[in-house]
């Protein structure tokens, strides 16, 4: 029994450590699969010995059973909001106010950090243990979302005590729960695939995901959290906001350290705000402003608060990503999968620095739900670089002249009867030969993230199709100089450049090729998952729905691939016409770096651990070569390890490998296994 207890403790510690590395430090040490193995082992031990399972075990994060309503939780200290400023002069006014209030003209140190667009949450830790978690609510009383918050891996259930001193007995941490833009997009893609209404923006997605009565739903949503303050920093004895954030991080909480800047002058604060606004599109999450705080906590205390906001902080709000404009007309675009998407043409308006003239209306049901009519005044928004969309119409501005939109019964390009399958929200053009579909597929095929063939824009593709020079992707590879030079839009140089670009595109990666095919629901990310997991085109082509769909319990399928994606991949490759089109591409000479390498080898399916310095190969290089031949590299030695590759100064992994009887090899043997012995390696 003592052994089991120790095992549970050791596994718990390891999992906590890896959670922290992954979710707080963004620097994982082990692969997802290794992590899953640790997790499963712990869950199995706890299931067999429930009396030994800790109440705050990491396995408890998967989500408890649903409840009827959220309990109300009063905040011991109210959660205030921030006063907003919109102009740079509001920042200098703020500084002047601080100095006036303190009756001191000495320069004040400020911190500047991004204002994350999510929802505010309070975490209460007592003696280092997470006791309650609540939403802001009205600031005085919030909703108890503890069971949901516990599913967020960025939130530690227990804090790490400092090496010197103690954790505060009571710590009320505040922060923002949010969803990354990419995760939001994937969630929406998945929802659209399942005929569920997409979320309007990452903030709504985060709020909707956290405020779930069933924590098991929250557990499946990719939520994150940044902590940005504590209700009462007094008992910590810490002197400044910056140091407080450093301490929170040391205790295991996730803070936005790389984006937390200390500025000694108000000009420096303004500059920092400017930089944040200019680079906001580069952040993986949405930010709607910058938060400026007086750095020193004793000054914060002296400044105190007004009724709704602290005096010592302000939000500098960025230009909005929502705007109001008019819908001039609604028409329908045909996508590469035949989807007929209604699109609103707008009176041009600037949104977050970009002129917007069009917005997607998604499908017939969305238009119906929002009751969007031609001539309507509407609110539109851009989230990150997502295609702009119409949020709502402004009914009070209707004149009565607005025209309702009716989904056309026919494809606007080829005239085929449009079909809407039962249970689906989209209308589709069923004609596989529809020129609009062909054109959109080709546009996608040549695009940057796909085959990256430069010099083939909309007009040129249209012309090539109209002149019957191309019908499908593989036809691109039969184009000749003589074909091109005949056309309006080509001159000697552009024709040669295009032919060169087409030739260069033949050598690509499996992921890019899969993405280029334009399979429904297979974006760049999913294509990469497919390539990483199957390694070869034929394996992807022959994969069954079962091989693809992620099943956590059974540990089958691919993490990140759900039903809708799996079905779509299988459906695509079952179509003999599609298979033929793919064969034609391969026959045209398209090659993936991986194909040749992934031929079965001694390395396929084997697990390696690397330790020490290898004589000639860099660690990343060795990893890549092993992965290319279908092997795996893990970071710790276990019974599942096949080979430990040891270089100079190997460290404890070597001893561990020897004690569990794992084969230990050197670089030369590794290269031999890879089929890259001296001769072949020099030939590369
Ligand atoms: S400090 C007294 N820092 O913005 C409030 N707030 O109205 C102290 N927010 O609901 C807030 N990112 O949830 C602070 N880095 C950040 C923030 C941030 C987002 C939210 C906060 C609050 C709203 C302010």
Image (tube, rainbow, N blue to C red):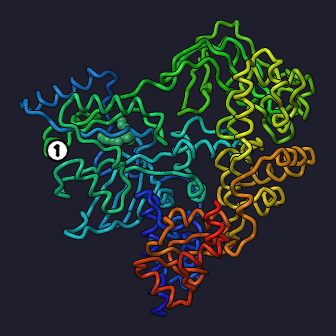
Q: Residue at x 78, y 56 (%)?
A: 537
The answer to whether residue 509 is above or below residue 366 is: below
| Closer to us: 338 or 299 | 338
Q: Residue at x 11, y 27 (%)?
A: 100
Q: Is residue 147 left or right of residue 102?
A: right
The answer to whether residue 420 is above or below residue 41 is: above
The answer to whether residue 281 is above or below residue 27 is: above
Can you say which quadrant of the picture contains the C terminus? bottom right
Q: Is residue 36 visible?
A: yes
SS of the residue under disc 1 = loop
Residue 219 coordinates in the image, percent (x, y)? 56, 58
Q: Is residue 46 visible?
A: no
Label 1 within 8 A of ligand 1 by Cβ: no
| Closer to us: 13 or 469 | 469
Residue 498 coordinates in the image, percent (x, y)? 72, 29
Which residue was labeled with disc 1? 296
Residue 303 coordinates in the image, percent (x, y)? 16, 37
Q: Residue at x 79, y 61 (%)?
A: 539
Residue 28 coordinates in the image, percent (x, y)? 47, 63
Q: Badge 1: few (under 14), some or many (20 or more) residues near its Cα, within 10 Å? A: some
| Closer to us: 556 or 150 | 556
Q: Residue at x 20, y 69 (%)?
A: 164
Q: Quadrant of ligand 1?
A: top left
């Amino acid at each position: 029994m003592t052994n089991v207890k120790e095992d549970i403790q050791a596994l718990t510690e390891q999992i906590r450590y890896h959670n922290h590395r992954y979710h707080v430090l963004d620097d994982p040490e082990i692969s997802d699969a290794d992590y899953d193995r640790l997790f499963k082992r712990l869950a199995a031990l706890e299931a067999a010995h429930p009396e030994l399972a800790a109440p705050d075990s990491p396995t408890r994060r998967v989500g408890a059973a649903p409840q009827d309503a959220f309990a109300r939780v009063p905040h011991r200290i109210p959660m205030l909001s921030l006063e907003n400023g919109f102009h740079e002069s509001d920042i200098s006014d703020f500084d002047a106010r601080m100095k006036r209030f303190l009756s001191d003209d000495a320069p004040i140190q400020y911190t500047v950090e991004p204002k994350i667009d999510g929802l505010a949450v309070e975490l209460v830790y007592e003696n280092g243990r997470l006791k309650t978690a609540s939403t802001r609510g009205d600031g005085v009383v919030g909703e108890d979302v503890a069971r949901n918050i516990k599913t967020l891996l960025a939130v530690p259930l227990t804090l790490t005590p400092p090496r010197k001193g103690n954790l505060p007995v009571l710590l009320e941490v505040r922060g923002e729960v949010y969803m990354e833009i990419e995760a939001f997009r994937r969630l929406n893609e998945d929802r659209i695939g399942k005929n569920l209404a997409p979320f309007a923006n990452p903030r709504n997605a985060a709020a909707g995901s956290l405020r779930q009565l069933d924590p098991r739903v929250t557990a499946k949503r990719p939520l994150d959290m940044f902590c940005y303050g504590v209700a009462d920093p007094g008992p910590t004895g810490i002197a400044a906001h910056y140091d407080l954030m450093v301490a929170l991080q040391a205790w295991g909480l996730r803070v936005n350290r790389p984006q937390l800047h200390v500025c000694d002058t108000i000009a420096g604060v303004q500059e920092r705000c400017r930089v944040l606004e200019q680079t906001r599109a580069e952040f993986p999450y949405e930010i709607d402003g910058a938060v400026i705080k007086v750095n020193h906590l004793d000054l914060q205390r002296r400044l105190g608060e007004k009724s709704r906001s602290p005096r010592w902080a302000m939000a500098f709000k960025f230009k909005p990503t929502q705007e109001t404009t008019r819908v001039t007309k609604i028409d329908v675009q045909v996508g590469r999968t035949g989807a007929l998407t209604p699109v609103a043409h707008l009176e041009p308006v600037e949104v977050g620095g970009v002129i917007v003239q069009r917005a997607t209306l998604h499908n017939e049901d969305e238009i119906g739900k929002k009751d969007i009519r031609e001539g309507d005044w509407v609110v539109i928004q851009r989230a990150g670089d997502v295609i702009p969309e119409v949020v709502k119409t402004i009914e009070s501005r209707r004149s009565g002249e607005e025209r309702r939109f009716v989904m056309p019964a026919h494809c606007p390009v080829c005239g085929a009867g449009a079909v809407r399958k039962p249970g689906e929200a989209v209308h589709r053009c069923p004609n596989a030969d529809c020129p609009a579909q062909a054109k959109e597929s080709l546009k996608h095929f040549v695009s940057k993230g796909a085959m990256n063939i430069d010099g083939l824009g909309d007009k040129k593709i249209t012309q090539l199709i109209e002149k019957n020079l191309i019908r499908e992707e593989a036809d691109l590879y039969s184009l000749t100089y003589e074909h091109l030079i005949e056309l309006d839009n080509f001159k000697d140089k552009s024709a040669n450049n295009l032919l060169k670009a087409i030739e260069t595109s033949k050598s690509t990666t499996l992921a890019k090729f899969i993405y280029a095919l334009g399979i429904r629901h297979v974006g760049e990310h999913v294509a990469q998952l497919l390539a990483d997991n199957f390694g070869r085109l034929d394996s992807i082509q022959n994969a069954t729905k079962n091989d693809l769909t992620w099943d956590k319990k059974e540990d089958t399928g691919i993490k990140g691939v759900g039903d809708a994606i799996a079905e779509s991949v299988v459906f695509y490759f079952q179509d003999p016409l599609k298979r033929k089109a793919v064969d034609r591409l391969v026959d045209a000479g398209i090659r993936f770096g991986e194909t040749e390498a992934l031929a079965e080898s001694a390395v396929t399916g084997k697990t390696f651990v690397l330790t020490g310095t290898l004589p000639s190969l860099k660690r990343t290089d060795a990893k890549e070569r092993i992965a290319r031949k279908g092997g795996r590299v893990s970071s710790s030695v276990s019974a599942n390890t096949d080979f430990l590759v040891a270089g100079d100064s190997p460290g404890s992994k070597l001893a561990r490998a020897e004690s569990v009887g794992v084969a230990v090899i050197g670089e030369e043997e590794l290269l031999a296994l890879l089929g890259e012995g001296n001769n072949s390696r020099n030939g590369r």
